[in-house]
Image (cartoon, helix red, strand yellow):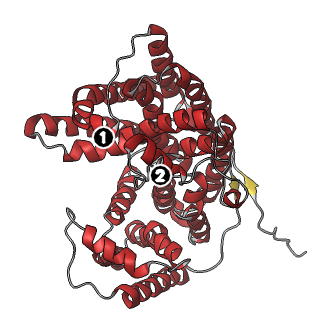
Amino acid sequence: MASVTAAPTMTIARGDHSRFTFLPHYRLLLVTLANLYGIALVLSLKYIIAPLFTYLGFGYHAVHDVRILVWMWGLVFIASWCLPIQLHKPSAFFTWLIYLAVWVPAILMPPFTSHYVYAYVPMQAVLFFAMMALCGVNLLPVVRLPEPKWSFKLFVIFLFAYSGLILLWLIANVGLPTSVPSLLNPYQQRAAFSAAIAGSGPFLYLVKWQTAVINPLLILIGAARRKWIIFAAGVGIIFLMYAMAGHKSYFGTTALVLAVYVALTFPPRFRSVLMVSGALSVIVFCSAVYWLTGSINLISILVRRMLMMPGLLTGYYHEYFTAHGFTGRFGPLSAFLATPPMDLTTPRTIGEVYFGRSTVAANANFWADAYSAIGYQGVILATILAVVILWTIDSIAISRNLMIATPIFVVVLFGLVNSALPITLLTHGLLISIIMVWALPGADDTRLARNHDA
């Protein structure tokens, strides 16, 4: 009697309830570190950032109302109890990332940097429930999607072919670089690069996807599979593109990819501790460098710009668009359907009003941008869309090599820290990363990441 082989189908994996375990000692450590992180942010604002950067909006205003203090710190405290401890899925990494880089600053910075306190309370409440929704993604069951049938070699050939075409197009338009611009002053090369490719239309998306998705894939495949020629090629392409474009963010993307990759080599229960202790250490280290040397470079870039600015801008967006009306622009097509109540784009409007220059593009996080579009409904809608996207990403990553899939998704999702959701989805390559990771062959490679899950 002939046997019947079932056709491959989508299967439902259980919810990741084991990843939300209490683990009292780890939970207590995480809660302590998360709240120390918030305290360190406020103290560095008061004693270093505010005295140095008041002209950029970073003043310090003590909050004397005990009710507001209990409210703010209560939100931070409660949220820290709900974050996942064991980080397996990309969504869990992203939840911690958005908590540290956006949510805590958005809760604390507006009241402490201005007198904008009581009118901001509803926004804090909505952000709290948005954070709880992101924490819940880790508990959702995932769908194991059908896997592609092409070979690993064919996939890598495609990556190199794409990279080669992009490099040839850039060389034809920009020319081969004769030197590598200094990291301290790459602006002349950057301006020349922008002028050379101006008006290139869709090709600009292809270049962005090369640096945000394709090149990190080469580096991660080389590292995860011990294919060091592929790894070296990925690093070499980054240096060549920096020499042509002068964008330091290319190195930042590569560094973040490798940082997440290294974090994945630790057992899952240690990864959350690494993230929050790392963020806290950045504040402490940069503050120590300032006090010991007087140099403001590190604390300005890593603390003021990366950690505090998303929170400051969330307050500005809420204050301005509450008073002047919403843009109605949520999503790429709405730009053709809605007439905003100002002449400039949203980021440049905030730049002109709060920083005195319309040339300043004050790009905020996806929650602030959603609020500027349609108010609190926008924050809720953006959160729902983020939950759907994160669930989709988890469903794809669960049957792929997590050492490759997780860093790719985390780095692309980092765009939500200072960009709108639709922009991150298209311009920053989130949609392309979803397609490319789904197309990644070799599901058996997941064992490389799971060796550390015990």
Residue 22 x %, y %: 53, 26
Question: Going 47% across and 33% down the picture, which residue do you hit?
Answer: 106
Q: 238 or 149: which is nearer to us?
A: 238
Please, is residue 23 above or below residue 271 in the view?
above
- State left or right for residue 301 relative to residue 33: left
Check residue 348 in the rendering and tell me which mark sits there, or answer none.
2
Going by the numbered disc 1, the residue's amino acid type is: Val
Quarter of the figure with residue 134: top right
Q: Which of marks 2 and 1 is in front?
A: 2
- Among the two numbered marks 2 and 1 on one chain, the one whose residue lies closer to the N terminus: 1
Going by the numbered disc 2, the residue's amino acid type is: Arg
Q: What element carries label 1?
A: helix
Residue 322 x %, y %: 60, 33
- State left or right for residue 336 relative to residue 226: right
Q: 73 or 196: which is nearer to us?
A: 196
- Which residue, as the protein is rendered here, is positioned at the far right? 1
Residue 339 x %, y %: 68, 53
Quarter of the figure with residue 312: top left
- State left or right for residue 402 relative to residue 295: right
Marks 2 and 1, how far apart at CA: 23 Å
* Residue 454 can be seen in this image: no
Question: Going 50% across and 70% down the picture, which residue do you hit?
Answer: 209
The count of marks equals: 2
Answer few, some or many: residues within 10 Å of disc 2's Cα (few below 14, many 20 plus, some between 14 and 19). some
State the residue position of label 1.
303
Question: Going 71% across and 66% down the picture, which residue do you hit?
Answer: 146
Q: 211 or 20: which is nearer to us?
A: 211
